[in-house]
């Protein structure tokens, strides 16, 4: 490729001193064996009758070289005769990959090659493919893989490409350590990164292998985590992989968190002809953030407000510069400069590198399209949205001049990456054990569709389902979510009945207003309900098959500072299930509220309310399988499902439930224990209401408990257990002092 570049420039130098134009009357093409004369004319976009000059010849030369069909091209125009001397690139006859025994790995390597058999042989593209194969092997754990590329020249102007691979030993991560002034315990930091320690039962996960790309991702995740916690000047100085024994490494991240920073003064500099009234929301946000801990997410809120202004036609040609100034050692002043940019429009957008992903998937993320005014802020937002899709290894953009003075060409280059994931996990606890499997694909058929299939097996239940998410459905900027589910739950010994349920759901979710979300859906289910001899007469009446159509919707207001481990703000959600068709009509309403408060350094208090009710809209009783039970994580100190109304068949649930929870983490307790976190909690709840009979107590009593919890990152997996004491209860309730759950992944 570099030699071709030199040839083009040499051609320009030789002919730059001449300015001529001739009408082509004759075309003479020599040296072409495979590519016909007519094909060359089409590829070079020339023909008899063209009026050609130096620039035209240069364009023909570049167009022909860009096809990769030709190794060397000489072109001249004399006496109205265009002469082209061609030397064709050889054709790749066969490609061999040696050293890989597993067929699935070899197939994957063939799939990622950009140069296939019967393509032209271009050396620099073969080198790119060699690097792609090497990166793929490293991702699979073959960190020490080595590739020797060989070229075999055949007699018929064809070549064979041979990739001789020595995979070496797999590089396993035996231990992950965090050193330096890191502020947070190892347990919390391990939950931030994607790499994980290798265990003998981890037979599926590839996150246990030493992979430089994943480690770089881990560094970015750690950097964002610390900055969202206020550590503006955090330094993830380095990572080291220390060889321990055969194929095993210790991964060490060295972190210097520095001081915790706070927002101080904000200034907004505008051009003189900008009306300040359009920027009031930004000023209000400035005032709200003053003296608050620094957070990347809050900076994104500011940029989001600037994006909204950039979307308005009044300020199409603006850009923003941000100046950050440290004052008083731990405070930040922000100066934001909005300025008008050169006014030009987008001529065209070229997209490169998407061999699997359809171009429409990429274009759906554009805020600036062909023909639009070029806006630097919105173009940057487009690139960030493409990166956020998590289906590309890298996204790069370039703005180049067009042939029109007032227009530019945008070149966007993406590098694709594997987007599928297989996972498995298991857990055991006080309430029983479970095994789960999941297969995910984030770019199904290259359409950007998310596909997720799950299977979960418990002692008395089996649940499975498939969910498909289609982003930007029909260019609505909203996602279409479709799912199919099937479950079987055996409660004969606990509650005197068993159910089988199959159905599907079709819905969407979108942000209606700022931080205000709406999630509507239609659901169709078929359910069978069986009882045994232990069931009461009233329950036996409900035995049979049921068909239901529901309209579900949820509205929520979310002001949390971040979705993962929030420290401030709240989330308030109301949900409702309305029967469209049913054999026993009932309406379900629910409300959830959670509020987060920063009580002290790294200490967050949580206050939450949960309430739900189901009411029959006809003379029929609420179906036993739809009756309500208190979630076990909202009332500790009591056995799961063994509180509330009870008849001869067991605990039957209620028509109404409500819970109140207070909790806080305790970072000051045993801070030297890196894999332990402590929590104090107080729970209160009530479950009551029996609509199908008046013969049993509706059990309206407030239950309450208090206790401490421990989250322990064990060598097997995360373990959490609680020691709690029931303060108030009903005689029929089953209490428990100790509860634990242990989980792991494979």
Image (spheres, rainbow, N blue to C red):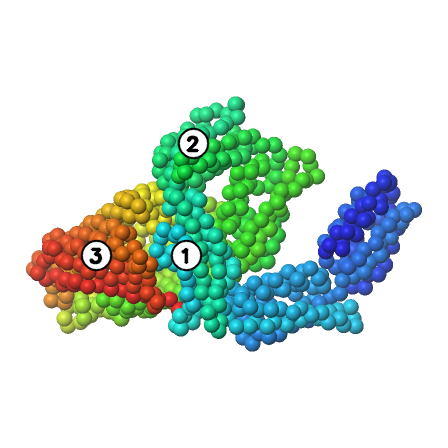
Please report contact status of discs 3 and 2: CB closer than 8 Å, yes or no: no
Q: Is residue 190 left or right of residue 128?
A: left
The answer to which image quadrant residue 708 occupies is bottom left
What number is the disc on residue 708? 3
Q: Measure the alpha-carbon separation of dots 1 and 3.
A: 29 Å
- Relative to 401, is 520 above or below? below
On-image quarter of the C terminus:
bottom left
Q: Where is residue 686 in the image (x, y as percent from the top left)?
A: 15, 53
Query: Sequence-wise, which precedes: disc 1 or disc 3?
Result: 1
Mark 1, secondary structure of its residue? strand
Q: What element carries label 3?
A: strand
Task: Specify whether 586 is left or right of 68.
Answer: left
Which residue is identified by label 1? Answer: 179
Of labels 1 and 3, the one closer to you:
1
The location of residue 179, given as percent across then percent down, is: 41, 56
Q: Which residue is drawn at 48% across and 65% down?
A: 242
Estimate the spatial distance between the alpha carbons at disc 2 and disc 1, rounded to whole Å. 35 Å
Mark 1 Cα-neighbour bin, 10 Å: few <14, some 14–19, many ≥20: few
Image coords of residue 227 (percent x, y): 41, 46
Q: From the viewer's side, name the closer residue of 193 and 44.
A: 193
- Name the residue that disc number 2 marks: 266
Q: Is residue 204 visible?
A: yes
């Amino acid at each position: 490729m570099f030699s071709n570049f030199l040839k083009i420039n040499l051609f320009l130098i030789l002919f730059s001193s001449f300015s001529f134009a001739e009408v082509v009357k004759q075309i003479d093409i020599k040296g072409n064996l495979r590519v016909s004369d007519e094909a060359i004319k089409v590829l070079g976009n020339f023909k008899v009758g063209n009026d050609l000059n130096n620039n035209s010849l240069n364009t023909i030369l570049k167009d022909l070289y860009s096809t990769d069909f030709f190794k060397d091209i000489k072109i001249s125009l004399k006496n109205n005769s265009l002469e082209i001397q061609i030397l064709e690139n050889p054709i790749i006859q066969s490609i061999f990959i040696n050293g890989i025994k597993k067929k699935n790995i070899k197939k994957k390597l063939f799939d990622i090659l950009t140069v296939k058999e019967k393509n032209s042989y271009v050396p620099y593209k073969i080198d790119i493919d060699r690097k792609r194969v090497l990166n793929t092997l490293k991702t699979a754990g073959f960190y020490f893989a080595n590739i020797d590329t060989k070229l075999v020249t055949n007699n018929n102007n064809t070549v064979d490409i041979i990739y001789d691979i020595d995979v070496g030993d797999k590089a396993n991560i035996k231990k992950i350590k965090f050193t330096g002034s890191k502020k947070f315990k190892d347990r919390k930091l391990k939950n931030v990164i994607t790499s994980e320690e290798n265990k003998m039962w981890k037979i599926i996960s590839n996150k246990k292998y030493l992979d430089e790309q994943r480690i770089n991702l881990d560094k970015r995740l750690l950097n964002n985590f610390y900055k969202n916690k206020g550590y503006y000047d955090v330094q993830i100085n380095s990572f080291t992989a220390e060889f321990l024994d055969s194929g095993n490494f210790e991964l060490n991240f060295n972190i210097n968190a520095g001081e915790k920073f706070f927002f101080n003064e904000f200034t907004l500099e505008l051009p003189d002809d900008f009306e300040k009234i359009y920027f009031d929301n930004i000023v209000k946000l400035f005032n709200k953030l003053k003296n608050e801990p620094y957070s990347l997410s809050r900076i994104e809120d500011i940029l989001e407000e600037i994006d909204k202004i950039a979307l308005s036609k009044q300020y199409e040609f603006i850009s923003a510069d941000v100046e950050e100034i440290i004052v008083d050692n731990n405070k930040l002043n922000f100066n934001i400069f909005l300025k008008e940019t050169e006014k030009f429009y987008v001529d065209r957008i070229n997209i490169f590198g998407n061999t699997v992903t359809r171009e429409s998937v990429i274009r759906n993320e554009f805020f600036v399209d062909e023909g639009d005014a070029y806006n630097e802020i919105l173009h940057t937002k487009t690139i960030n949205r493409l990166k956020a899709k998590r289906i590309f290894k890298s996204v790069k953009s370039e703005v180049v001049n067009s042939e029109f003075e007032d227009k530019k060409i945008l070149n966007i280059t993406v590098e694709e990456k594997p987007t599928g994931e297989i996972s498995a996990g298991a857990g055991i606890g006080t309430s029983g054990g479970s095994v789960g499997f999941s297969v995910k694909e984030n770019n199904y058929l290259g359409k950007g569709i998310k596909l997720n299939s799950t299977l979960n097996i418990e002692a008395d239940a089996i649940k499975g389902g498939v969910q498909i998410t289609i982003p930007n459905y029909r260019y609505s900027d909203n996602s279409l979510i479709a799912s199919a589910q099937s479950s079987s739950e055996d409660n004969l010994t606990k509650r005197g009945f068993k159910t089988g349920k199959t159905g599907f759901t079709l819905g969407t979710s979108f942000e209606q207003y700022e931080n205000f979300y709406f999630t509507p859906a239609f659901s169709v289910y078929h359910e069978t309900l069986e009882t045994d001899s232990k069931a009461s007469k009233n329950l036996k009446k409900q035995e049979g098959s049921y068909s239901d159509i529901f309209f579900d919707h949820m509205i929520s207001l979310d002001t949390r500072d971040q979705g993962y481990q929030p420290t401030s703000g709240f989330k308030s959600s109301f949900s409702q299930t309305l029967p469209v068709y049913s054999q026993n009509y009932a309406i379900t309403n629910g409300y959830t509220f959670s509020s987060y408060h920063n009580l002290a350094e790294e200490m967050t208090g949580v206050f939450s309310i949960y309430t739900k009710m189901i009411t029959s809209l006809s003379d029929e009783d609420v179906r036993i399988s739809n009756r309500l039970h208190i979630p076990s994580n909202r009332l500790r100190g009591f056995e799961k499902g063994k509180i509330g109304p009870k008849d001869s068949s067991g605990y039957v649930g209620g028509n109404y439930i409500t819970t109140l929870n207070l909790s806080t983490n305790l970072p000051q307790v045993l801070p030297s224990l890196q894999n332990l976190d402590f929590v104090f909690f107080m729970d209160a709840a009530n479950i009551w209401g029996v609509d199908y009979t008046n013969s049993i107590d509706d059990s309206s009593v407030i239950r309450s408990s208090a206790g401490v919890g421990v989250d322990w990152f064990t060598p097997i997996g995360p373990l959490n257990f609680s020691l709690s004491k029931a303060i108030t209860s009903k005689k029929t309730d089953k209490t428990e002092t100790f509860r634990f759950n242990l989980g792991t992944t494979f």
